[in-house]
Amino acid sequence: MARNPEKNREQFRPNDHPNDSFLLTTVVGSYPKPKWLNRADELVDDPESKFDEAHLGEAHDDACRIITDEHERAGLDTVVDGEMRRNEMVEFFAERIPGYDFNGPVKVWGHNYFDKPSVVEEVTYDEPWLVDEFEFTSNVASRPVKVPITGPYTLGFWAFNEAYPSTEELVYDLADLVNEEVEKLVEAGARYIQIDEPALATTPEDHAIVGEALERIVSGIPEEIRIGLHVCYGDYSRIYPEINDYPIDEFDVELCNGDYEQVPVFEDPEFEPDLALGVTDAHTAEVESVEEIKENILQGLRIVPPEKLTVSPDCGLKLLPREVAYGKTKNMVTAAREVEAAIDAGEIDLDDPLAGY
Amino acid sequence: MTERVATTPGLYPLPDWAKRTLSDLKGHQKGDLLSGDEGSEITETYDEVRGELIDHQLDAGLDRVVEGQGRWDDMIAHPLTIHDNVETGGIVRYYDNNNFYRDPRVVGELTHSGDVAADLEAATDVLAGDAPLQAVLPGPYSLADLASDEYYGDEGEFLAAVAEFLAAEVEAFPAHETLFLLEPSLIENPPETDTEERATEAIRTVAEATDAEVVVHTYWGALDEKLYAHLVDEAGADALGLDLVAGDRDATVYNVQEYGSTDSLALGLVDGQNTLVEEPGTIAERVEWFEAQVPVESFETTYLTANTELFHLPSNKATEKLAALAAATEVID
């Protein structure tokens, strides 16, 4: 069953929050890298350049400061460093988990490739994966920091499995490692963890495997820690209402991209975790107006009451031009604050939030 | 006695250097992929790729050598996505994989193209008689399944038109020993009951366009038994290709026990979607496991092959698997 989001949501309300209502604003994680950081990534591989790993580390630190600050300037209640240190969502973790090996790029489509790793022996936990990243961001941020982690189902199924009798068994071993990492992050002060499982969107029939993996991930994690799950665009009717049984505080969905056609899927039975609703489209390069995003937020109130609604972009924003990503984030926060004020003023019928639209 | 032939279904991964060179030359976006009229720099790169892929197969000692299909940006949808009367729509999922191809929207008559024949001519020149050539094409059922018809207007008519198109392409091929027709849709999206004959008729149209041995290769599981029986009897194939890696192997064995088989068979024995390189002994055991259960004294030819296309693998592992397949034929003999 769902965890107890009531026990951990209030800690993210800023002291100077202007409204009684509180729609927690956040992001999914990735953000466009500054152009110079991409150049720096290339430069470090150039044998003729004097630019070395230490310089790249400095560049990553600088980029993390800038993007964390950009999130704060946009007004977000919880921030991320934009995943400036990460390359690809499976590769980054596979490089840190003993048991994975790399053989070279494989095709996704056209000339787009990824370094799909192979699991060649039992996966184990060595050094922390994200604690340094979290501590750095936490030190430069004035708002609470959310930590996105690629989930064990995706880490298992988006790799070649050479070592385990079934990929399901690999997923459970990986879930135990994620649990260890979450414990270390909690020790370091993290209060908001998001598990990313894009692979579930393409194989919804495996929802029970993801559920079992989540049970392992949250084992021993206290209820004041907020655990979210992000699953990108897919046919949510294939995993709902099953996700009500997942031990999570928040379920983050991509619905803007499908124009909220799937909202009715979540209306019955009652949605149990908090809902983190995508209210700006991560796949269009136009910044939605505040008015448009307000209407999108109201779609979420068809599913949950305001005290259970979190607003975020549909997905990571890394493929957008940076100014567009910023514009969407800033307008999203403005829209959330205006909707809160309207709720406080009794201007929104919570039984029929879109009345008047 | 059964002749053992080591081969592959083609569609090799590009060598890593070519992945970089071609993405630099072509770009990463949908509009940057091949339309069949690429310039000389890109053509020369693909010539080099073809040479390298053929060398790998000769070095491994495969009994049939494929062109490698390095140019097939859209996997088995390629013969349509480069066609003049086909427009490419959005990026769509390639079966149940984390792979995508451009949706081929057929907007005019499927006239002769000659694109694949030209690549096979080039492969023939590279081979210079060192090994027999194997041609590879999508089967008509799968190609029609992957495409959107905006011209013919009738499902049956469209399938027949795709078959006629492929048959005309085959007629333009240079000499080839074997033709592999890749038909994953027969398993992934099989014809509805009582339309099986339409599918087998289409395959027969293509099979009859060549004097070579024709292998109708299926993968990602076992065929429905009724469809299997239709294919054995009606498709005009010298061999059916059966996947012994993915899905329900016992169901495949049952089909052969119950409905017999073509005189030759292709067996998908090596996993085209896992980097674990099979030992030749393991591959041989799989052949023996299969043959021990089927009520056939001997087949004319057993093709030992990867179950799927090889592009799912990193280039180094794909190459290692070729050697394992070739060595397996030695182990059995």
Image (cartoon, grey):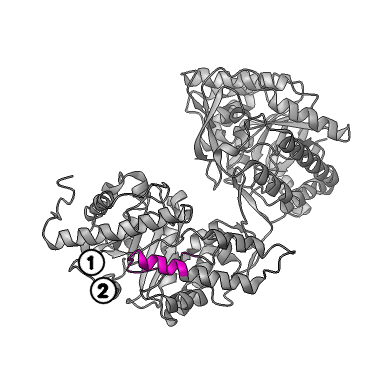
> What span is in magenta?
A66-83
The residue tagged 1 is A22
- The residue sitting at 74% across, 53% down in the picture is B316
Is A16 placed left or right of B275 in the picture? left
Q: Is residue A70 magenta?
A: yes
Amino acid at dot 1: Phe
**Position of B267 relative to B213 (above/below):** below
Name the spot of residue B228 as percent of width and height, x first: 59, 31
Mark 1 and mark 2 residues within 8 Å of each other at the beta carbon? yes
Amino acid at dot 2: Glu
Residue A247 seen from this side? no
Is B125 placed left or right of A274 in the picture? right
Graded by Cα atoms within 10 Å as few (under 14), some (14 to 19) or many (20 or more), the crowding at tag 1 reads: many
Question: Is label 1 in a helix, a strand or a loop?
Answer: loop
The residue tagged 2 is A10
Q: Pointer 1 indicates a residue of which chain?
A: A
Quarter of the view holding residue B4: top right
Disc number at residue B325? none
Graded by Cα atoms within 10 Å as few (under 14), some (14 to 19) or many (20 or more), the crowding at tag 2 reads: few
Name the spot of residue A254 as percent of width and height, x first: 37, 52
Q: Looking at the picture, do discs 1 and 2 lie on one chain?
A: yes
Quarter of the view holding residue B8: top right
Q: Pointer 2 indicates a residue of which chain?
A: A
- The residue sitting at 48% across, 56% down in the picture is A318
Name the spot of residue A13 as percent of width and height, x first: 27, 72
Residue B184 seen from this side? yes
Please state, as top left, top right, bottom left or bottom right, where the N terminus of chain B lies in the image.
top right
Please state, as top left, top right, bottom left or bottom right, where the C terminus of chain B lies in the image.
top right
Q: Is residue B51 magenta?
A: no
Of the numbered discs 1 and 2, the one sitting upstream in the chain is 2
CA distance separating discs 1 and 2: 9 Å
User: In the depicted view, which residue is nearer to us: A176 or B330?
Assistant: A176
